[in-house]
Image (cartoon, grey):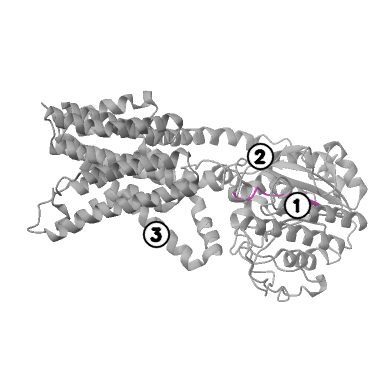
Amino acid sequence: MPQVQHPANWITSVRAVLAVTVAVIGPTQLGLALVVVALALDWVDGQVARRTGTASAFGARFDMETDAFLILVLSVYAADDIGWWVLLIGAARYLLWLAERVLPWLRRPVPPRYWRKVVAAVQGVVLAVAVSGLLPSGWSAGLLVGALVLLAESFGRDVWWLWRSREAEVPYPEGGGVTLLALGAVWVALVLPHDADDLARLPVDALLLVAIALLPWRRARAIAAAVLGVGLAAVVVVEAFDVGFRTFLDRPVDPLTDWAYLGPGVGVLGDSIGVGPARATAALAAVVVVALLVVLPLATVRAAGTIARHRRPALAAALVLAVAPLAQVGSTSATGLAYDEVRQVRADLADRQAFAGEIAADPYAGIPSHQLLRGLRGKDVLVVFVESYGRVALEGTSFAPGVEAVVDDGTRRLDDAGWSSRSAFLTSPTFGAASWLAHSTLQSGLWVDSQRRYDQLVGADRLTLTSAFAAAGWRTVFDVPANTKDWPQGQEFYGFDHLYDSRNVGYRGPEFGYAPVPDQYTLARLQHLELAPRDRRPVMAEVDLVSSHHPWSPSPAEVPWDQVGDGSALAAPPASDADIPALYGRSIEYTMSTLVSWLEAQPDPDLVLLVLGDHQPHSYVTGPDPGHDVPVSVIARDPRVMHRIAGWGWQPGLHPHPDAPVWRMDAVRDRFLEAFSR
C-alpha cells in the first residue's frame, strides 16, 4: 500500500494543501485561519503516526518539508513589513539543502530531537503573529529576532553534531538536484511570475508537458519536449519585453515590429549610464536570451523523462492541475501570453490592409497647391515638439506647481510682448518614448500608434503638413538636434528642403544628458540660419526641443541670447541630488522658459508657432494610469491667425486648464489645413 495512504501522511497532505493555499491568498483573515489549522495539524500528524505505528522515514521527511514550505511562505509575507532579514527564517532549510550538495558530511541523518520540533513550531507561531498585525511592528520584530536565534541554535547544534561525528561520505541521490532545478525552471517559465505570490500558483499549462511525457516513443518525446522548451524560452523573452513595454510605453509589445526599439533603447541607456556599460548590459541580455534558449529545452527534456518514469504520480499531478482553475490557484500565463501574441500578429496583418486604405483616403490629396494655407501666406510657421511634455507636467504631480508657474509667467510675458496664445490638449498615440509616432501622427492626420504603422506610412505617399507647406511655396526644414546620422527615410517621406541635426549646427558646448544640443542653442541657431536672413521664402520648420528627454539631468542656465555663440558659453550645471520627477519638471521649466524668452526677442511680427508635447514621460514619473494627453498651444502676434482658430474653443494662454478641449493628435492636420486654407 503506498505510504501516502497512511493516516499520518494524509494529515500531512492536508497541511501541504493548506500551506499552498496560504501562499496564494496571503495573510488574509481566511489565510490566517488556515495557518492556525496547519500549525495545529502539525502536532496531530505526529501523534497519529506514533499511535498507529505508521511512523516512517518518508513521513518524517514529508512532515519536515511541509513545515519548511509553510515557514517560507510566512517569512515572505512577514519580510514585506518587517525587513528582508526575516527571509533567513524561511530560507534556512533550503540553504542547508544547498550546503549538502557541496559538503558530503552534512548528508548524514541526524538523531531525532524533540527540541527541533519545538523550534519549528515556534517559527510558525511567531511568523503567524507577525503577519497578523496583532502586535506593533517593533514587538513583532523582537519576537522574530528571538525565533531566528532559536533557529540558528537548533541548526547550529545539528551541524556541530554532524561535524564531530563525520565518517565516510554518505552517497547522495544522483540527479535529484539537477532534476529539481529543471522542474523549478519549467515551473517558473510556465507561471511567468510578476511577484512572489505567483510562484505558488499551479501551472495548468504543465498538462502539455505531462502529455508529452506520456508519449510511448522516447525519441519523439525528447523532440517534442525540446520544441516545448524553445517555445517556453520564446514566451519568457516576450514576457520580459511585454513587462518593459507596459511599464515604459503603457502598451503591450508587438512581436512583429517592436524589436526596432532595441537599438534606440540601448542608445538611451548609454546616455544614462555610459556607452560602455550600456553595451555590456545589452550583451548580457543577449547572453541571457541564448541561455534561455539552451537551458529551458534541456530542462523540459529532463522533466519529461522524469515524468515518464513516474507515470502514476504524474497522472495524479495532472488531475490536480486540471482542477486547479476551479480552486482559483491555477495559472495559464504561458499559454495565455502565447495566445495573445498570436492574436496580435493576426491583428497586425489585418490592420496593414485597413491602414493602407486610411492612407489612400486623403480629403486634401487633390486640392490645388495655390489653395493650401492661404491664411498663412508670407508667415514663418514653426511646429515645435517639446520632448516628454505631458499633461502631468501641469496637473496633479509634485513638480506641476513649478511648471505651472513658468507657463503662467510665460503667458504674461508673451502678452506684454504683443503675442497671443490659445491652448488645449491632444491625445498622443504613444507614451514614454517613440516620439516619431507622435510626429508622424500630427503631420499625416493618421493614427500612428505602432512601429508597424509608422514603417507602412513612411513607405507610402501621404500629404503631410510639411509637404503641404512645400507645395504652397514655403521652404521646409526639420531641426532634429538628437539625430547623429543621416535620415533618408524621413527625407523621402516628408520631402523637407534641409535637415539640421547635431552634426551640422556648429555646436561646441557641453552635452546635457541625452540632448547633444540644448534647446537654447537650437532656437538661436535656427534664428541665425533660417529666420534672420532677408530676401528668402517663408520658412516652415518642425523643431524638436529635446532638453527634456529621458534620462533627465540638470538643465543648463540660460544666457543672454547675444552670448549663445557656438554654445561654449552654456556651462554644464553642477550635479544635483534631486529625484527623477523633480529633474523632469525642471527640464520642462527650462524648455518653456527658454522658448518664451526667445519669442520675447523675436522681431518677426508674422511668426506663427504650434507648440506641443510629443508624449507623457515614463510611468515612474507620471504614476499609474496618467493617460496620453499632452498640452498644445498656438502662438502668434497677428490677430487674424487667432481669428481663424476661434471655432476650436481653445483656452487663452499657454496653460490649458483641466477642462480644456481634448483632441486626438491625428485630428490636427485636417483642422489646421481647414482653418488656414479657406
Residue named by callout 1: 401
* Marks 3/2: CA–CA distance: 38 Å
* Image height of 80 relative to 345, above or below: below
- Given residues 505 and 129, the one toward you in this image is 129
Query: Are the two marked residues, 3 and 2, in contact with CB atoms closer than 8 angstroms?
Result: no
Q: Indicate left or right for 194 with 323 as reference.
A: right
State the quadrant of the C terminus. top right
Which mark is on residue 284? 3
Q: Which residues are magenta?
A: 609-618
The answer to whether 174 appears left or right of 445 in the picture is left
Task: Provide the residue designation for mark 2.
Answer: 446
Which residue is at a point 52% across and 52% down the rendered structure image? 261
**The N terminus, quarter of image:** top left
Q: Secondary structure at mark 2?
A: loop
> What residue is shown at x 20% (from left), y 56% (from top)?
159
Whole-number angstrom distance, CA of label 3 to CA of label 1 = 41 Å
What residue is shown at x 67% (from left), y 72% (from top)? 572
Distance from the alpha carbon under mark 2 to that under mark 1:
34 Å
Residue 372 against residue 355 in the figure, above or below:
below
| Badge 3 element | helix
Element carrying mark 1: helix
341 relative to 148 in the view: left or right: right
- Which of the two discs, 3 and 1, labels the residue nearer the N terminus? 3
Residue 456 sits in quarter: top right
Magenta span contains residue 611 = yes
Taking depth in this image into account, of 675 and 235 the one nearest to the observer is 235
Location of residue 466 in the rendering, given as x and y in whole percent from the top left corner: 72, 50
Near mark 3 (Cα within 10 A), the count class, few <14, some 14-19 or many ≥20, is few
